[in-house]
Structure formats: structure tokens, C-alpha cells
Image: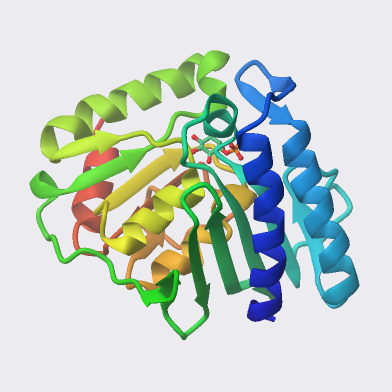
Amino acid sequence: MKKELIKIIKKAGKILKKGYYSNKDVTFKAKKDLVTKYDVAVENYLKEKFTKKFKEFNIIAEESDNTNIEFNNSIIIDPIDGTTNFVNGVPHTAISLGVYKDKKPYLAIVYNPILDELYEAKIGKGAYLNGKQLKVSDETELQKALLATGFPYTSGSNEDDLNDVVKKIKDILPLCQDLRRLGSASIDLCLVARGTFEGYYEMNLKPWDVSAGVLILSEAGGKITNINGEEYNLFEDKYIVATNGKIHDELIKNLNLL
Ligand code: LIP
């Protein structure tokens, strides 16, 4: 299945790449949440291929109505993760695919066609970037850790969320090496898997933003939890905290300061 998925995602990557270098008509799903015809085109292409080839899986996808789709044996698609980057020509943008069997992660692919970086993982078989095995960073000190985060679309409309983002930056920034905001959750998780970042946290993500990245990171030796240090639930948790495992407890402690 993985080989087939990679073949299909590489073709879909051509649609994303063509759009990246073209003029885009942007529509607003919400005040800060964008969508383009390329998000829809990539998603439709993937859904058409997957419904034909992988009949045993249903599909949950960012630009579709998922109300009547039960998460179980599912392929979760983000056709363009990092749409704001895509629209503005920032090259951190990717197609993200997480394949779940009995609600458990089975296969994952994150493909950035602009940089031609393909991250993949299969449960129990390790994580790879363009064929090279990935391993998380060995750094154990939070003070030396390069972290990443993201800002929720709700920061334009929900004052509690905005205050929480600002508070956590104030609490965490002095305690780490520095903090990045690259704008694509799937790639952020892959960069922790790669050892570029030691950790990453963000609120209000959707299952398609992280369905693939969580498996890629855990297969690279990382740890993913909610903000209480418990098992992360794709559909229910407000916060994701993802690290190399070695700074996890300290990061969790400082994300929960009163
Ligand atoms: C985006 C993320 C980004 C996050 C945004 C959003 P989209 O996904 O990957 O990092 O901060 O809130 O969820 O909407 O571009 O697929």
C-alpha cells in the first residue's frame, strides 16, 4: 500500500507545485482560514484514486463534509497543510496522509513538493526522509532546545485562545534556545522527527493537520501527548505536545504554569 500511496501523492504534488507558482484565487473559510482551488483539486485527485484503490478505507479530508464518516479504517487527508504559506510563497507546505486501521496509525506520508521532501513511516518500521532513516535529537536540556509552535485561526476571534498563545510564549521563550512558527503542523512534526527541532506544541489543530506527523515522529523515537502528558487524541485534544522525548516532561510542566 505504501508504494501505491507514494506514487499517488507524488502526482498530487505536481498539482500543488503548479499552484504554488501560479496566481491563486483565495477564499476565506473563516477570518484567518484560507482555501484555494488547489486545495480542492489536490483533495479531489487523492479521493478519486483512494476510493478506487483502497476500498477497505473510508476518507476523512479537510475540504470535505466528514459528518457521516466514522473514524476507524480511515485515510485522513490534508491536501495542502500550510495553506497560508502556499498562498504567500513560503515553501513550508505539504500534502499530509495518515492511514489508520482500527483507529490506530498504520502508515503516514508527508510530502513537500516544493523542496521535494518526502517523509514516510509504517508502524514498527521506522521513519524516513527521502529514503534516509530519521531519529530525534539527543538534546536533554530545555534551555538548549529549539522549539516550534503555531498560532490558531481562532486567535482572530477568540480572546481566551489569543491570551493562552501569548502566555505560553512568555512562559516558554526564556526557557528554551528559541521558538519558531513555520506554519505547517505536519512539517513541524517531521522536523522534530528529523532532529531539527527538539519539540513542538500547538492548540486547536484538526486531525488532518497531524494524522501523519504523529506516526512519523513516534517512529523516529519521539513522544506525542496532550498538554497533560496523556495519550494524544486526534479528534478531542485541544493541545498537542510533541518532542524528542527527552525534554517532554519539562516542556509539559512549563506549558502548564499558572
Ligand atoms: C494549518 C497548520 C498550521 C496551523 C494552522 C492550520 P492548514 O493547516 O498546519 O501550522 O498553525 O492553524 O491548522 O489550514 O494550512 O491545512
Q: 245 or 39: which is nearer to us? A: 39
Image coords of residue 178 (percent x, y):
18, 36
Q: Determine which quarter of the picture holds residue 150.
A: top left
Q: Determine which quarter of the picture holds residue 248.
A: bottom left
Image coords of residue 67 (percent x, y):
85, 47
State left or right for residue 161 relative to residue 96: left
Image coords of residue 200 (percent x, y):
34, 47
Q: Is residue 26 visible?
A: yes
Q: Is residue 103 visible?
A: no
Ligand 1 occupies quarter = top right
Q: Identify the residue at image location x=61%, y=33%.
A: 21
Q: Is residue 184 above or below residue 7?
A: above
Q: Is residue 173 above or below residue 159?
A: below
Q: 203 or 129: which is nearer to us? A: 129
Quadrant where the image shows the N terminus: bottom right
Toward the bottom, the furthest residue is: 125
Q: How is the image coloured?
A: rainbow
Quadrant where the image shows the C terminus: top left
Q: Determine which quarter of the picture holds residue 128.
A: bottom left
Q: Is residue 126 above or below residue 41?
A: below
Number of numbered discs visible in the structure rendering: 0
State left or right for residue 226 relative to residue 170: right
Q: Identify the residue at image location x=54%, y=15%.
A: 156
Q: Identify the residue at image location x=62%, y=44%.
A: 17
